[in-house]
Image (cartoon, rainbow, N blue to C red):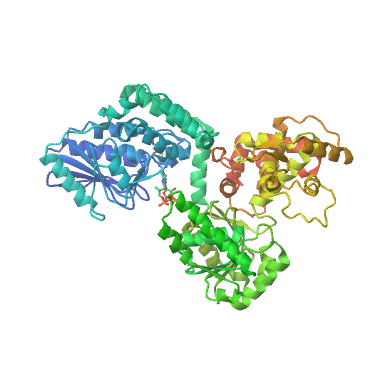
């Protein structure tokens, strides 16, 4: 075996040259990898003893793509295209041997090989769209030539990975070899290619499938229409579609030029920068400075969930999905039955859509034990409380758990606002108490806020963070404080939204501005969906807010057919003249002089205080880093990923500009806009949140 460079080897076995890449963790195409690949292929091509070449990777995966950490930096030679050129024009057949995930530039490298073999567990995909890009090394031109236009459109705009079996069926892989036997399988395949004198199959020359779509622009029009909602606000899906159109309508090399131009455009834009930021932010969130990666964790073999309402049921499903048995507790049989029924119906609905087998539904339901007795949680390793959000109730539950739970069991609260230390104080083991704040619907939303109490043990924190990954969540460690990170910042936006409608805007103005910004819905549409009467007590109601007045009028949201909006029988919202009058009357009574409020002010008033509050959270050490706050907002509140999260967006907007506007608002409207000390300091020092 001859080392080509630090990450690449070339060995010759019989008459086959084997190029091996070994660049952990994921063999990404860094400059060193590109240099090694190019040199190794050149050497193999030049070696007369080599008749065919196998490209294989060491470690957990085939090449998982370009090295994202190099993006935005000056390019280093050779380019990936130069490497591809050497491989594709090799006069000797090249076989790519794939395990793990062949993604992005990795799949594009495999696509210039003449043949591709893989193990059954391998996956392939072009996920560039997820980081606001498109495959920039010929992927948009080669993929449709193999899999056809419809399938290619789907793959490049969803970024989804396809299984080896599917890849084989589509012709993306030529052969599957035995699991664990990739090297031998690929060598055998290369020998067959030689023995049978198979041609040097170049994907670029396969025109049939793109020709079949030529002159049929409706394919693209329909695809755009069908996905308009999903793609709203994003640039990359549209640019990916344009590349596939180019593959259909232009000669290969012209198509490559279109792809290259659009790739550079996306790379230079703020959306891709934001999405790349989120990619690394989500991985960074797992790192906790004072809880090292080798901190021991506790085994979680059995989970208890207290409360079988919407939240408790959703939480339980996460564990059932991951194969962890759950005991779910309710106080009354009928509530227990209802909760268990909802879980079953959710699974059955998924099965109906073909995304779960009937057997799997039964297997998951079989892991669920409903009970009316808290004592049945005695053997659980983790108990999550999801009961009514009232401190006295939480304390009572934790006091009882302290008596029941086995030593060392983790006692978690799903509270969204309450003080985790006060809850912990109800037990004699505060070191075992932690907050696990799930977001509704808990089986769907990816965010898990892990709330660290003053005395929470590091083992408990490490276990909670690992658990997040096990159940497919993005776990973010936050400090204890009212509303933690997400809801604390949300409160800023909600307060301003309520003030804006009294000062001159209407609910639909505020909602439109935030929707256009990219959020899934505005605060008033959200209230209508959730129900205006959450936390509303009819016996205490005194028309003191617009919301109270609406509840008193039985306009309690979508469920009553009216809330901030009027709804028709299909639940389509319309601005409500009644609500308009309620707001005008309310403002008059409160002696608020209404004025015209433009969209810019709505946006600034709703979002700048959030950035400011995020800075305050950082200042208080309630979040480890600004990017953690971004991860919270993207995964828990629908902040558009192409805007990178509130802190990333705040920097893009300009911290200086935000500070200036906060000061102006403070002068005009009061201390709700008081700038945080951190914001002031960063602006004075010309720094960003990373330097906080
Ligand atoms: C592209 O290819 C553009 C081309 O079309 C055009 C070129 C001209 N770069 O996720 P994990 C790191 S764009 C750099 O925890 P898993 C990651 O940060 C690229 N680093 O593991 C982490 O580091 P750390 C298209 C990368 O097993 C470590 O590897 N490709 C890259 O859960 C482990 O990652 C993609 O978008 C990268 N490309 O999942 C694929 N990928 O330990 C992106 C990973 O320091 N990657 N790292 O935090 C993934 O989807 C997943 O990482 C993968 C493994 C499925 C591969």
* Image coordinates for residue 143, horizontal then vertical, percent: 33, 34
Number of numbered labels in the structure image = 0
Based on the displayed image, in which of its 4 quarters is residue 604 positioned?
A: top right
Give the residue furthest to the front: 569
* Image coordinates for residue 368, horizontal then vertical, percent: 50, 66
* Image coordinates for residue 570, horizontal then vertical, percent: 62, 40
In the shown orientation, is residue 322 left or right of residue 610?
left
In the shown orientation, is residue 247 left or right of residue 205?
right
Give the residue furthest to the bottom: 403
In the shown orientation, is residue 544 left or right of residue 105?
right
Name the residue: 46% across, 40% down: 130
In the shown orientation, is residue 630 left or right of residue 348?
right
Residue 678 in view here: no
* Image coordinates for residue 187, horizontal then vertical, percent: 18, 47
Residue 664 in view here: yes
Name the residue: 51% across, 51% down: 284
677 and 651: which is toward the camera:
651
Name the residue: 27% across, 32% down: 203
């Amino acid at each position: 075996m001859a080392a080509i460079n630090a990450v690449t080897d070339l060995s010759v076995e019989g008459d086959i040259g084997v190029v091996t890449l070994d660049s952990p963790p994921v063999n990404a195409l860094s400059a060193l990898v590109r240099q090694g690949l190019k040199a190794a292929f050149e050497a193999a091509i030049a070696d007369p003893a080599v008749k065919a070449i196998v490209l294989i990777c060491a470690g957990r995966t085939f090449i998982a793509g370009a090295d994202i950490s190099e993006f935005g930096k000056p390019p280093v030679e050779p380019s990936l295209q130069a490497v591809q050129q050497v491989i594709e024009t090799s006069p000797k057949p090249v076989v790519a041997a794939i395990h793990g995930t062949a993604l992005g530039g990795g799949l594009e490298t495999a696509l210039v090989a003449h043949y591709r073999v893989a193990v059954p567990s391998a996956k392939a995909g072009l996920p560039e769209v997820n980081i606001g890009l498109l495959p920039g090394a010929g992927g948009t031109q080669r993929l449709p030539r193999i899999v056809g236009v419809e399938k290619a459109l789907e793959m490049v705009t969803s970024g989804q990975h396809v299984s080896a079996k599917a890849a084989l069926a589509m012709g993306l892989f030529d052969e599957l070899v035995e699991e664990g036997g990739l090297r031998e399988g690929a060598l055998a395949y290369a020998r067959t290619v030689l023995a049978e004198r198979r041609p040097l199959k170049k994907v670029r020359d396969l025109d049939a499938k793109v020709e079949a779509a030529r002159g049929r622009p409706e394919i693209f029009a329909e695809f755009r229409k069908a996905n308009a909602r999903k793609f709203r606000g994003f640039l990359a899906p549209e640019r990916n579609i344009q590349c596939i159109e180019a593959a259909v309508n232009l000669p290969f090399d012209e198509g490559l030029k279109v792809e290259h131009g659009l790739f550079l455009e996306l790379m230079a834009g703020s959306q891709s920068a934001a999405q790349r930021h989120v990619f690394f932010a989500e991985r960074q969130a797992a790192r906790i400075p004072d809880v090292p990666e080798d901190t021991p964790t506790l085994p979680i073999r059995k989970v208890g969930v207290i409360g079988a309402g919407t939240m408790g049921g959703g939480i339980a499903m996460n564990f059932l999905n991951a194969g962890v048995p759950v005991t779910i507790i309710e106080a009354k049989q009928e509530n227990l039955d209802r909760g268990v029924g909802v879980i079953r119906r959710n699974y059955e609905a998924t099965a109906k859509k073909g995304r779960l087998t009937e057997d799997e539904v039964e297997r998951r339901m079989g892991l669920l034990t409903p009970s009316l007795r808290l004592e049945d949680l005695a053997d659980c390793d983790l108990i999550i409380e999801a009961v009514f959000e009232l401190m006295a109730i939480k304390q009572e539950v934790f006091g009882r758990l302290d008596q029941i739970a086995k030593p060392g069991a983790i006692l978690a609260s799903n509270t969204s606002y309450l003080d985790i230390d006060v809850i912990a104080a109800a037990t004699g083991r505060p070191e075992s108490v932690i907050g696990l704040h799930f977001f509704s619907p808990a089986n769907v939303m990816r965010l898990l806020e892990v709330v660290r109490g003053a005395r929470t043990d590091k083992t408990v924190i490490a276990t909670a963070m690992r658990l997040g990954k096990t159940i497919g969540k993005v776990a973010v460690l936050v400090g204890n404080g009212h509303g933690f990170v997400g809801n604390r910042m949300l409160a800023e936006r909600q307060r301003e939204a309520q003030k804006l409608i009294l000062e001159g805007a209407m609910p639909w103005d505020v909602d439109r501005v935030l929707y256009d910004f990219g959020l899934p819905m505005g605060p008033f549409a959200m209230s209508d969906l959730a129900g205006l009467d959450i936390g509303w007590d009819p016996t205490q109601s005194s028309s003191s807010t617009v919301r109270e007045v609406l509840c008193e009028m039985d306009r309690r949201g979508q469920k009553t057919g009216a809330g901030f909006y009027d709804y028709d029988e299909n639940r389509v919202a319309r601005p409500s003249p009644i609500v308009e009058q309620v707001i005008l009357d309310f403002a008059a009574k409160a002696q608020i002089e209404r004025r015209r409020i433009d969209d810019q002010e709505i946006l600034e008033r709703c979002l700048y205080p959030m950035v400011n509050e995020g800075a305050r959270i950082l200042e208080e050490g309630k979040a480890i880093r600004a990017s953690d706050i971004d991860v919270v907002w993207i995964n828990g509140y629908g902040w558009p990923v192409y805007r990178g999260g509130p802190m990333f967006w705040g920097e893009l907007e300009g911290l200086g500009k935000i500070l200036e506007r906060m000061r102006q608002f403070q002068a005009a409207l009061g201390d709700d806009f008081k700038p945080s000390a951190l914001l002031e300091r960063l602006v004075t020092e010309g720094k960003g949140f990373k330097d906080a």
